[in-house]
Image: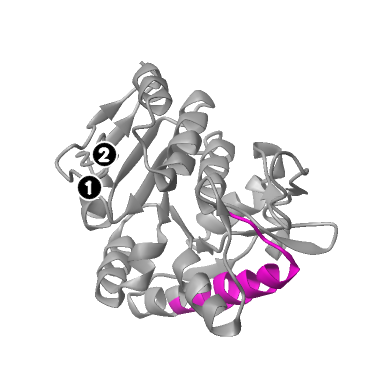
Amino acid sequence: MNKLYIIKIGGNVLDDEPSLKKFLKDFASIQAPKILIHGGGKIATKLGDQLGIQSNYVKGRRVTDAETLDLVTMVYGGLVNKQIVAQLQEWHCNAMGVTGADGNLIKAVKRPVGETDFGFVGDITTDSVNSTLLYFLLKQNVIPIFAPLTHANGTMLNTNADTIASVLAISLSKHFDVRLIFCFEKTGVLQDVKDEKSVITNLNKSTYLKLLKEGSFHDGILPKLENAFNAIESGVKEVLIGEHTNLLANTSYETKGTLITLS
C-alpha cells in the first residue's frame, strides 16, 4: 500500500511564527499523501482572555460551554485553519481547510456527562470518519488540513486534535500504510518533564502503564499517549511523538523522538 503521513501539530508551534513557517515549508515538501491536524488552544485561550471568556481544563482537555464553543469554532475553524492553508499554498501545497462538518468528514457524539461535564465536546470512533471522501481527496492530490472540530445533530463540537489524528489514522489504515506523527515543541516523550535529555526513545505499553501509575507524565502529554496506543492497538503501523523540527527525518527512514510500540 502507499504511504500516508498523518501529522498533528501542537499549539506551542502555532504560537511561534518562525517555527510554524519552517514546519509548514517542511510539511509541504513531503512527497507523499499527507494530512495535517492542528490544535490552537493557546490562541483560543489568549483571545478568550481578551473577550472575558475563561478557559477551564480537566486532565489536559478543554471544558467547552456554549460561549467557549463559539470561540473555538471561530479560532480553530477560521483564523488558525485558514492562516495555515494560505501559507501552505505559498509553498505549492494544494491544501484544503476542513472541519469534521465539511463533507460530513467526521461525525461525533456529544460526550456524556460523567465525573466532569465537558460541555460541547465531541467523542469519535473510526466509524465516525468518511474515509471514502478522504481517500478520494488524497488521490486527487488535495491535502486536508483539519481543525479540531466535529459535528453532531446540527451543532459543532470541540474535539481533541490528538484524538482526531488517531481516529483518522486508524480509519485510513485500510487504504494506506499509515505513519502517525505527533509533532510538538519537545524532543519526545520525557520521563522527567524538567529534563529535556530524558527522552524515552521507545515506549511500549507495559512501560507506559508503569510510568502512568507513577505519575511521571505531564497532563499535556496524556492525550497524545492515550491516542498513540489506541492507534497502534487498532492497526496503525507506526506512531511517533517528537519535535516539529524533526518532521523531515520522521517522514523518511529515520525516527527521532519517541517510537510507540506494543511490546
Render colour scheme: one colour
| Above or below, comparing residue 67 to residue 205 in the picture | below
At x 50%, y 49%, the residue is 60
Q: Nearer the viewer, residue 243 or 216?
A: 216
Label 1 or label 2, whichever lies nearer to me, is 2
Q: Residues within 10 Å of mark 2 (few under 14, many from 20)?
A: many
Please give left or right for residue 182 compared with residue 231 in the image.
left
Predominant secondary structure in magenta?
Answer: helix
| Residue highlighted by disc 1 | 187
Mark 1: give few (<14), some (14-19) or many (20+) Cα within 10 Å. many
* Residue at the extreme right: 153
- Residue 226 drawn at (x, y percent): 49, 35
Q: Is residue 107 magenta?
A: no
Does residue 74 appear in the picture of this structure? yes
Q: Residue at x 28, y 56 (%)?
A: 185
Label 2: which secondary element: loop
Q: Which residues are magenta?
A: 62-83
What's the residue type where badge 2 is placed? Leu
